[in-house]
Amino acid sequence: MWEQIAANRRKSILLVMSAALLLGALGWALGVNFMGRNGGVPGVMLALVVWLVMTLTAWYQGDNIMLSVAGAHRVQKEDLPQLFNVVEEMTLAAGLPKMPAVYVIDDPAPNAFATGRRAENAAIAVTSGLLKTLDRDELQGVVAHEMAHIRNRDIQLMLFAGVLAGAIVILAEGGLRGMWLGGGRSRSRRDGGSDGSGIVAILAVVLMILAPILAQLIYFAVSRKREYLADASGASFTRYPEGLASALEKISRAPQRLGGATSATAPMYIINPLKRAGEMAANATSTHPPIDERVRILRSMAGGGLADYERSYREVTKGGGVIPKSALQGEPAVAAAAAQAGQPAPQVAPAPVAAGPAPSARESARQVDDFFYRKDGYRKVDCACGTTLRIPPDFATPAAKCPRCGTLHDLR
Amino acid sequence: MKCPACRVPMYVVEYQQIELDLCGACEGVWFDSGELALLLGDQRPLDAAPAPTDEATRSCPLCDKPMDKVNIGPGRRVLVDRCPRGCGLWFDGAEVAALVADLDAAGWGLPAAVHGFLREMFPAKGGK
């Protein structure tokens, strides 16, 4: 596991360097194009300043920005006890130093993401649709997947990758717009065009068009690989891959589309919120691997360990592995380890469920709705016939009728 | 959430841990797809192709897309509005009672608990 994180760190550095090179090249091209021969260095400086400001903003405010763009609200244990229990259990299973803050988004589309700059101050957000759609094992699978993103330091990597891609997109768009408006050297040709500025201009335009695409591809490629790794680690936390498999299926089949997600934040979610069922084909522009492949890998696992995932991944994709070798050596498959010890392979079982009966789907749906009714200032009216009426603060009529018994409840 | 017909804020009624949104003005009812899933478990009985009609098009109270008109129920006689994105179903004031009457006449393969819920929540008597 720790090796896997070290591998992530090496990849982060490589990614930051290659994207930084791209950024520098773009800055140089912009500088030369708009400021002439000697503009290269100031151009690079400008690009670095833009990137630095964005990185610092993301480092200190990225999680808050992400949570507020997504419309997430912080909840406490008494609001959603079931969700809290699952998060507590998975914090322990993942070995995180501190339980992430828990947020809920009032949106019928089931989805989830994790964010934060390190494991000590991470946050995990789920939609109300997720809580209403999934049973406890499935919710545990999703939370474990998000914990894996925190534990594997993906949240940090994605924050950096996202900012780099964002800085490149902003600079390139700004540059292209500047050229449309006629600010480029290629149009003005004040130097008589004999200094090769025409070629520079063409190169600059090509770079301005290609750089954002390249940056996004780097971002998406990183994000895709992270998803497999988070599935693998998540399954190893719950030792019950079926929970996550079934959850992924349900989430991908849900008809609703998530509001409050943009192409910049899409890679953060457990399932790409911008695509609907049927549009899930994978290619270089996918932020996530295809769902049916993720589900098939999880379902073909012989046990709940990382090595089981690796074996299943190779079988399903017919390709190379996804988990670094060094990480696998530290953790033998459950089935294999048991066989070595001369014992029958243990059944893959759900992680221990907290004491007390798990609330039914209807009950947990009401828990999350009640939270938002309280937050939004709804008034609760209990009708004698057994129904409960909830009146929004902007309700215009002075009375509300119970449809069941016909009682008119005076609201004044 | 605003009524797709009258555009006034709706209130929520909860019974047997199922929630529906009601309009106080026109007595129309919004069945959210999440609540339909909790109630039915399976939404296949609601599959129907959009029907041609002169009724005014309404917008989904959640996603604001124009809703399809579909005939549902055992006799396919109840014309309701369905969100094309799957947010839920909208019943005009008398339509739930019409559906319940249809259900009373022919079973339509809905679980007894669902039928019972609808009949209790929307008694099909004249006292509305």
Image: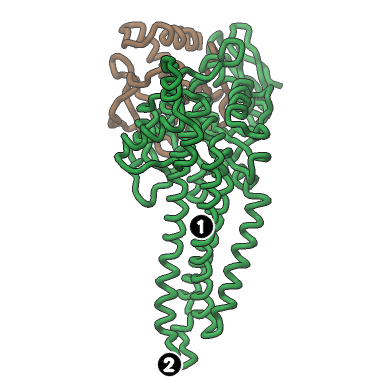
Chain colours: A green, B brown
Residue named by callout 2: A194
Marked residue chain, label 2: A
Identify the residue at horizontal 40%, vertical 6% (top origin). Answer: B112
> In the rendering, at what x and y percent does residue B40 appear?
41, 16
In three-dimensional space, the C-alpha distance between marks 2 and 1, rounded to whole angstroms, equals 39 Å
Chain of residue at mark 1:
A
The reply to the same-chain question for discs 2 and 1 is yes
Asked if the residue at tag 1 contacts the one at tag 2, i.e. Cβ–Cβ closer than 8 Å, the answer is no
Q: Position of residue A18 (x, y in %)?
A: 49, 62
* Eye-nearest disc, 2 or 1: 1
- Mark 2: few/some/many CA within 10 Å (<14, 14-19, 20+): few
| A272 to the left or right of A363 | left
Looking at the image, is A36 positioned above or below residue A294? below
Q: Is residue A173 visible?
A: no
Q: Position of residue B4 (x, y in %)?
A: 48, 32
Residue at figure coordinates x 57%, y 78% from the top left:
A41
Q: Of the numbered discs in the image, which one, if any, rests on residue A301? A: none
Give the SS element for disc 2: loop
Q: Quadrant of residue B33?
A: top left
Q: Quadrant of the C terminus of chain A?
A: top right
Structural crowding at the residue carrying mark 1, measured as other residues with C-alpha within 10 Å and reported as few (<14), some (14–19) or many (≥20): few
Residue A346 in the image: above or below residue A113: above
Instruction: State the residue at coordinates (50%, 8%).
Output: B127
- Position of B51 with respect to B112 (left or right) is left
Q: Position of residue A157 (x, y in %)?
A: 55, 49
Instruction: Provide the residue designation for mark 1.
Output: A14
Q: Is B28 on the left or on the right of A354, as rendered? A: left
Residue A326, above or below A44 = above
Secondary structure of residue under mark 1: helix
> Mark 2 vs mark 1: which is more N-terminal?
1
Q: Amino acid at mark 1?
A: Leu
